[in-house]
Structure formats: C-alpha cells, structure tokens
Image (cartoon, helix red, strand yellow):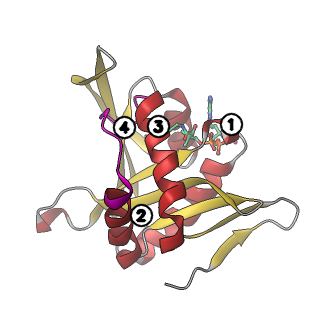
C-alpha cells in the first residue's frame, strides 16, 4: 500500500499518515506496552508479531490505521474497526488510540483522531463508539474534547491487575 502523509505541521517533527505494512513492529510495541502497563486494553496477553501483522493487515485492507511519527519513529497509532460482527451493526465503528507514554500530552492523540474521524466517515461510518475504562481520565478528556458524548458507564464488567473495571461508552455521530 502507498502511504500518504495527510497531516504534517512544518513547524514540528510530528507527522500523521496512514499506516503501511512496515509499521507492524512499531504498532505492536505500542500496543503491547499498553497491555503490560495499563487498563486501556483488557487483556494481559501480548500480541505476537504474527498476530500483529494479521491484525494490521485487516486495517490496511480497509485503510483504517493511522500512525504518528516523530523524526521517522512511529510513536502512536489510532484505528477504527467493526463495533460488532453482525451485519446490522455495520454503520457503527469503534476507535482505538494509543500514544507511547513518553509522548503523551503533546497533542499527538488529538492529531491522530482528527485524521481518523473524517476517514471513518468517508469510509461510510455513521457512528463511532469509544469504549473507555472509566478511570482513564486522559482518554475520556480526549474524546470529550473531540465532541464525543458520554452515553453511560457499565459497572464492574471486567477485571485486570486484580481489580474490577468499569466501562464508559462514548459516542460520536458522524
Ligand atoms: C489517551 C491518549 C491516547 C491521549 O493522547 P495524548 O496524545 O496524550 O493526548 P493529547 O495530548 O492529544 O490531548 C488531547 C486532549 O485530551 C485531553 N487530555 C489528554 N491527556 C490528558 C490528561 N492527562 N488529563 C486531562 N486531559 C487530558 C485534553 O483535553 C487534551 O486537550 P488539550 O490539548 O486542549 O489540552 C494517551 O494518553 C494514551 O495513549 N494513553 C494510554 C493508552 C490509552 O489509554 N488509550 C486510549 C484507550 S480508550
């Protein structure tokens, strides 16, 4: 796939572009770090490189994965995919966004999402859902600042690191 630079600020070294096959290792590193260190992903099982490549391939096929680079290094990604497998849910997609810990709070998550949201709409999505661990204040604030509405919180629907997790559902109409 051809990678197109879609949002480069000439005053900074950060660029957002659609992902390519070559990004599999970097995306896997970012995702596995979030699995190991956070309750953003509700599993403790990290992705193998084979799983990471297969997962990325699904995104490349629908052009639903974006990455942010600083000085040529991929430091963050955002993607959208089906919310549910049944065909009746097809107009609704779910997004994810992950920034390497040392690069958080610099506007990278916002820049990724401002590329991703119109891309999902252009691909035919009617609604984007974000499922966010209820204590993940940075993600809740990011999505709120992008116009997502909070639908509600499901109490104690998961566990990780030996504690109950609540799930807040946010929603953006496209
Ligand atoms: C959540 C996450 C993607 C946000 O990305 P980021 O690059 O750190 O966020 P940004 O710097 O782009 O901030 C965008 C907005 O989010 C909000 N925000 C981000 N971090 C925040 C924090 N720690 N506290 C409060 N608000 C915060 C602010 O509203 C900010 O708007 P501003 O620029 O007007 O201040 C990032 O912190 C991350 O990857 N966290 C770990 C993985 C994760 O939780 N992913 C989301 C799973 S649902």
Q: Is residue 38 left or right of residue 84?
A: right
Q: Circle 3: is it few (<14), some (14-19), or many (20+) Cα within 10 Å?
A: many
Q: Secondary structure at mark 1?
A: helix
Residue shown at the point (50%, 55%) measured from the top left: 27
| Contact between labelled residues 2 and 3, with CB atoms less than 8 Å apart | no
Circles 3 and 1, Cβ within 8 Å, touching? The answer is no
Which residue shows up at 66% across the image and 50% down it?
108
First along the sequence among labels 1 and 4: 4
Residue displayed at 39% across by 65% down: 56
N-term-proximal mark, 4 vs 2: 4
Looking at the image, how many numbered discs can be counted on the residues?
A: 4
Ligand 1 is found in the corner quadrant, namely top right
Rounded to the nearest angstrom, the CA distance separating label 3 from label 2 is 28 Å
Q: Position of residue 1 (x, y in %)?
A: 49, 84
Q: Residue furthest front?
A: 49
> Is 96 on the left or on the right of 19, as rendered?
left
> Which element carries disc 4, helix, strand or loop?
loop
Q: Which residue is mark 3?
A: 34
**Splitting the image into 4 quarters, where does residue 131 fall?**
top left
Q: Which mark is residue 41?
A: 4
Q: Earlier in the sequence, mark 2 or mark 1?
A: 1
Answer whether labels 3 and 4 touch (C-beta < 8 Å): yes
Q: Is residue 42 magenta?
A: yes
Mark 3 or mark 1: whose residue is earlier in sequence: 3
Asked if the residue at label 4 sits under 8 Å from ligand 1, the reply is: yes
Mark carried by residue 102: 1
The magenta segment is 38-50
The kind of secondary structure element at disc 3 is helix
Gap in angstroms between the C-alphas marked 3 and 4: 7 Å
Q: Distance from label 3 to label 1 (Cα)?
A: 12 Å
- Is the residue marked 3 within 8 Å of ligand 1, measured from its CB? yes
């Amino acid at each position: 796939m051809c990678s197109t630079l879609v949002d480069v600020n000439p005053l900074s070294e950060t660029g957002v572009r659609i992902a390519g096959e070559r990004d599999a290792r970097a995306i896997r590193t970012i995702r596995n770090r979030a699995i190991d260190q956070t309750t953003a992903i509700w599993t403790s099982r990290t992705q193998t490189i084979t799983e990471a490549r297969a997962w990325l391939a699904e995104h490349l096929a629908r052009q639903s994965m974006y990455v942010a680079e600083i000085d040529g290094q991929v430091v963050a990604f955002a993607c959208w995919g089906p919310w549910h497998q049944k065909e009746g849910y097809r107009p609704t997609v779910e997004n994810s966004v992950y920034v390497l810990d040392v690069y958080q709070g610099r506007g990278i998550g916002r820049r990724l999402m401002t590329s991703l949201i119109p891309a999902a709409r252009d691909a035919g999505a009617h609604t984007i859902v974000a499922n966010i661990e209820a204590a993940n204040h940075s993600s809740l604030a990011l999505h709120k600042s992008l116009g997502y509405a909070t639908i509600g919180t499901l109490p104690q629907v998961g566990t990780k690191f030996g504690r109950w997790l609540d799930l807040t559902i946010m929603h953006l109409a496209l």
